Image (tube, rainbow, N blue to C red):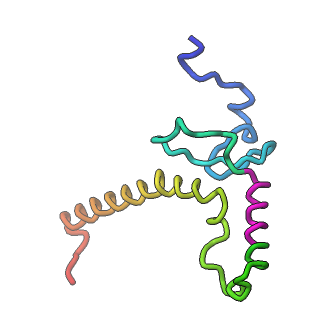
Amino acid sequence: MACAYPRLDMEVSKKMNHLLKAPFCVHPKTGKVCVPLDPLVVDDFDPDAVPTVASLLGELAAAAREAQQGPAAEAAKAPPAQEPWRATSMAEAVRTFEHCLLEGLGASNKEELAGRTRVAVAVGQLNLEF
């Protein structure tokens, strides 16, 4: 029967610091970042491969050093073409978040807004004359 439902520890279920509640929050002891999972490839997930705050800071520092010392020192004086985090191991997690959650929410919101607009036009609450 123990395999039929998840076992919840009392401390884990009532204390905020034991729970990873949202994507991109940081575990207080390990420093690991909570990353969203793509349900289609969840079996490939490796919890030891997720970024930590320390590894992300190292990646950002290395990118900054490379930009200062690289052959394109003049180009480094120009504003960066993209946000610095996009060159870190968080980029894939953000892409997963955007693909699995935000795109679906955007499409859902668009459909709901279109439906509400159709209803408002039908009952005469909205006039769409141009």
| Front residue of this view, candidates 62 and 83 | 62
Quadrant where the image shows the N terminus: top right
Return the x and y of residue 91 as percentages of the image width and height: 60, 59
Quadrant where the image shows the C terminus: bottom left
What range of the chain is rendered magenta? 52-64
Residue lying at 63% horizontally and 39% vertically, measured from the top left: 46
| Front residue of this view, candidates 5 and 96 | 96
Q: Quadrant of residue 90?
A: bottom right
Left or right of 37 on screen, residue 105: left
Residue lying at 55% horizontally and 20% vertically, measured from the top left: 5
Q: Quadrant of residue 17?
A: top right
In the orientation shown, which residue stands out farthest toward the front?
Answer: 71
Return the x and y of residue 120 as percentages of the image width and height: 25, 65
Q: Is residue 110 magenta?
A: no
Residue lying at 64% horizontally and 44% vertically, measured from the top left: 21
In the orientation shown, which residue stands out farthest toward the top?
Answer: 1
Residue lying at 79% horizontally and 43% vertically, measured from the top left: 30
Q: Main secondary structure of the magenta part?
A: helix
Return the x and y of residue 70 as percentages of the image width and height: 74, 78
Q: Is residue 55 magenta?
A: yes
Above or below 79: residue 123? above
Left or right of 93 on screen, residue 103: left
Left or right of 67 on screen, residue 43: left
| Front residue of this view, candidates 111 and 119 | 111
| Front residue of this view, candidates 74 and 91 | 74
